[in-house]
Image (cartoon, rainbow, N blue to C red):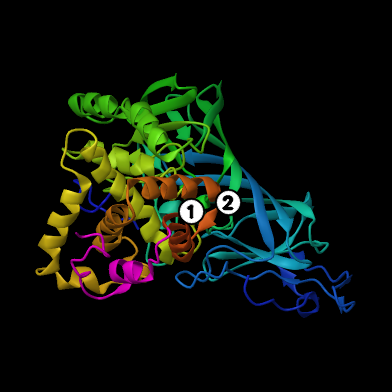
Amino acid sequence: MPGPWSTVVDVKKRTARGVLLSTVCGLVLAGVPASVGASTDVDASGQITAPSAGASGAGDPYWPLDGNGGFDAQHYDIDVAYDFATGELTSVTTLRLRATQDLSRFNLDLLAAPDSVEVDGVPAAYRFESGHEVVITPATPLRRGESAQVRVAGRWTPAELSYAGESNWLADGREVVAINQPHMAPWWFASSDHPTDKATFDIEIEGPADVQAVSNGLLVSRTVDGERATTQWRTTSPMATYLAFFALGRYEIARGIRRGLPWYVAVSRELPTAARESSMRLMRRTPAITSWLIDRVGPYPFESTGGLVTSLGVGFALENQTRPVYPLMGSDALATVVHELAHQWFGDSVAVHRWRDIWLNEGFASFFEVYYRETHGGPPAQQWLTSTYGAAANHAPAFWRIDIADPGRDQIFSTPVYQRGAMALQALRHRIGERAFWRLVRTWVATHRGGNAGTAQFRAMAERISGVQLGAFFRAWLSAPRPPARTRANGLR
């Protein structure tokens, strides 16, 4: 998402082993009896073990039900159809997963009760609980290392759904855009909804033939059948579930290739003519900004780049993988585009290990707003740092109270996470020097490409590359409830 000082308002929002299969024997779930056959296995010590339930969450303390244990998501095939007249969504998701334990049952994250669940083509027992979990018991337990295809189908009205205080569905009678953070997936498909469980995606969207469907990755096909059209998009790079999106609406489209990288941008035709034209000019700058980032950060991590401007009143921009989504923007629009495209490396390719690490996403994206201005005729980033520090040091005590390395779930998108995150990175640049800083940036994204990482790993890499002990530096900038001392060690002199 964009930095909170831009013109876009930022409002975005396998632990313990479960019970044994025997505890669910004889239960009847959602019309299908639970399996009573529990295969056995032998562990490393020679003890006979029984399949057990996967955990109901990935272990993130901010949202304990996000993600799931016992398996690794590999690939999603998602087929959705949306009815503008009723607001009803039909969703069929086929998830290919690999069991990471002998698995008697497992969960998927979804906000509506499905109509059917199958595992490898066989109806599976399931129940819907906590308004967020589909608990699935396959007819035959899954063995560790085994792959399975899980099909979850249903029909519901996403606008009626909410989770963790979020009501995220964004649609009117002409356009729908499925975007938000940290949660969006369970409004429209069954998933393991945590950034640590990335997968590849095929997304197929059905809607009226007179609208376009836009999603992540590369456009594969569009087929028109009478008054309906079906469009398929594919991303072959691992993607966190909250970054998956689709949009249906009447869009002006532009596309091309720059430096061998395909780009695809879309602007809603529901916008007034002048706004639509200015938005398209802005979106056409996407390939050049992406190219600028490649030169500074390293190879682009995905198969395409682009963006979409919606007419809906979203109030924020979001870094959906390969194709950020923007509202109609004002005078600082270019900085927002730089921010969201920087996220393709910082947040999308290198994703958080836990949501408390969000400053690494937002701090880097906000830093690149400042650095872009520095390299395009604006003031040096160090000047921005010292002036911002001076303005906040004596007049905004609340700005320093949040531990941005662990801000709490209600503060992950607060101003300090963005602005102090960017300040810390510029201070680090000044502290360790240009050569070490840019080597750190490029090494960070290359080492963790397609994966997850957190604050401790970043500090360790910064110390290794710079040869400087930085514990006190990071405590001062991230965690101390006061402004860092104006010292050379803190990058302020």
Quarter of the picture holding the C terminus: bottom left
Residue nearer the viewer, 285 or 235: 285
Dot 1 falls on a residue whose secondary structure is: strand
User: In the image, is residue 16 above or below residue 384?
Assistant: below
**Mark 2: amino acid:** Lys
Q: Position of residue 194 (x, y in %)?
A: 53, 59
For label 1, count other residues whose C-alpha is less than 10 Å away and answer few (under 14), some (14-19) or many (20+).
Answer: many
| Residue for point 73% across, 53% down | 118
Q: Residue 476 lies in magenta, yes or no?
A: yes
The reply to whether callout 1 and callout 2 are in contact (CB within 8 Å) is: yes
Report whether 28 appears left or right of 221.
Answer: right
Residue 350: x and y, percent?
49, 50
The kind of secondary structure element at disc 2 is loop
Left or right of 392 on screen, residue 429: right
Disc 1 from disc 2: Cα separation? 9 Å
- Which stretch appears magenta? 467-493
Image quarter for residue 269?
Answer: top left
Residue 58 picture location, percent across and down: 57, 66
Which residue does the numbered mark 1 point to in the structure image? 351
| Residue 177: image tag | none
Would residue 470 appear left or right of 44 to someone viewing this image? left
| Residue 268 sits in quarter | top left
Please name the residue that numbered disc 2 is placed on. Answer: 198
Eyeballing the image, is 217 above or below 348?
above
Q: Which x, y percent locates residue 156?
A: 51, 52
